[in-house]
Image: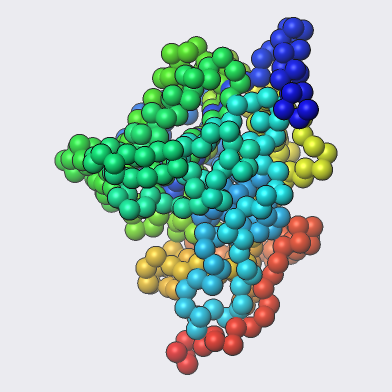
Amino acid sequence: MKAVLPFFLIFASLLTGEEKPPNLVYINADDLGWTDLSSQGSRYYETPNIDQLAASGMVFTNGYAAASNCAPSRACAMSGQWTPRHGVYTVSPSTRGKAKDRKLIPTPNNKTLADEVLTLPEVLQAAGYFTAHVGKWHLSEDPLDHGFEVNLGGFHGGAPGRGGYHSPYNYPNVVNKKKGEYLTDRLAEEACRIISENKDRPFFLSFTTYSVHTPIQGREDLVKKFAAKESTAEHNNAEYAAMIASLDMAVGRVVETLKEHQLLERTLIIFTSDNGGHEGVTSNEPLRSGKGSYYEGGIREPFFFSWKGKIKAGQSSDTPMTNLDLFPTLVAAARAPLPKTKLLDGHNLLPLLTKGQPLSERPLYWHFPIYLEGYRENDQETRDPLFRTRPGSVVRLGPWKLHQYFEDNGLELYNLDEDLSEQTNLANTKPEKVKELLALLENWRKETNAPVPTELNPKFRTPETH
């Protein structure tokens, strides 16, 4: 009965003249930094198609991922829930780095999104949507177990395996033993085929590219192009620039396919990234640090929505939001029934997107009760030279952002309106603001049952005893 009822409801809505539910296209790049688009400030990378799509709708200048690395960010998007609710905090065991450098025993990590977590594609599928996943999944062995009807390229792996971005490669339902095909091109072709084959029924397409995750490998023709182009101090990697160009072409192909089938007015398109840019490969300046960190460079993302005729073009919003808002927003756009038992931690952005109705100010939270080692030693953009981040929590309310670290109860307070680079810690000079935000953080941890590691690690050695 579950499979029959939704289609009956759609058919009934057509008989009564109710507008057909929109198609939903979710494009999630991998490791794309906040400044990695031309429209976001890069003077070296080229993204004309993505820039044009951004200009056709609303750009969120304070758009965030709900986690600073790929698996937990994707788990938040698919579940609509904060990390403490699903327990996916990182991409591998929480005991990252050397044991002698970890003062606390970190919280165990869930590597897989649990089957009992109701996902966005499951809700959409129950409402009569055709659901397809193309590209990186990283949450279980098969996205078909979480509400998708088609899977092309998604499995538990988080990066291209042997062969990297160049065939021969072997992903679920994406096999090419012939040398030379570029993975991003192939996935774009598959995404466009899905659109063409399902143009006459509502569909949810999750197009989550492996680009621009390591290994850094671009198409040879594009690498040559950017190697010959004058670079900048911030952005100067020709291979990475070529990868971004391929990503841009893929997005352009998807949009063009929607145009060919007169689907743009019936399609809500979302573009974002799962976390910040990879330090050492790209620069996230003026944001501090990058992927894996809870400074702005690790979590602030390109984020925009486009829906021709519904979302006015050329808009920009400074409303802070995260990818947790995707679940309630897409469910509202699809007019899909949501079980009363499903708890969502994000907000429906549709009134803001389509009618300009402001969203009430709300705190945003991040929780990371584990360790994540650094990319390179003596990285001044992180809190210390060994780890990108140590166990802690973060809250943002308005322009204020508070970091709390569990090892030493270290507190860092920044006013992002005045200090986007998070260089001036105001914790000692703004004690009342610290008290206010810390109370919010502690109450939120209680509400979500967020684990806070307190057990000392017997293998820990202070720097003096190393």
Residue 111 coordinates in the image, percent (x, y): 58, 59
| Residue 452 image-quadrant placement | bottom right
Tell me if I can see residue 137 in this picture: yes
Question: Is residue 26 in view?
Answer: no
- Which corner quadrant of the image does residue 26 belong to? top right
What x and y, as percent, mark residue 145?
Answer: 61, 43
In depth, the one of 372 and 341 nearer the eye is 341
Whole-percent x and y of residue 79? Answer: 66, 45
> Where the N terminus falls, by quadrant?
top right
Q: Is residue 280 left or right of residue 225?
A: right
Residue 359: image x %, image y %? 70, 35
**Figure quadrant of the C terminus:** bottom left
Which residue lies at the image location 61% right of the left edge and 73% below the top edge? 106
State whether residue 262 is above or below residue 245: above
Please give the name of the residue rendered at 76% of the width and 57% of the height, measured from the top-left corner.
448
Which residue is found at the position 56% from the left and 68% from the top? Answer: 94
Q: Nearer the viewer, residue 408 or 153?
A: 153
Which residue of the protein is positioned furthest toward the right in this rendering?
340
Q: How is the image coloured?
A: rainbow
Q: Tell whether 171 sits left or right of 123.
A: left
**74 to 272, vertically: above or below:** below
Judged left or right of residue 189, residue 389 is right
- Marker count (numbered): 0
Does 389 sit above or below residue 359?
A: below
Q: Is residue 378 left or right of residue 220?
A: right
Identify the residue at horizontal 50%, vertical 67% (top origin): 372
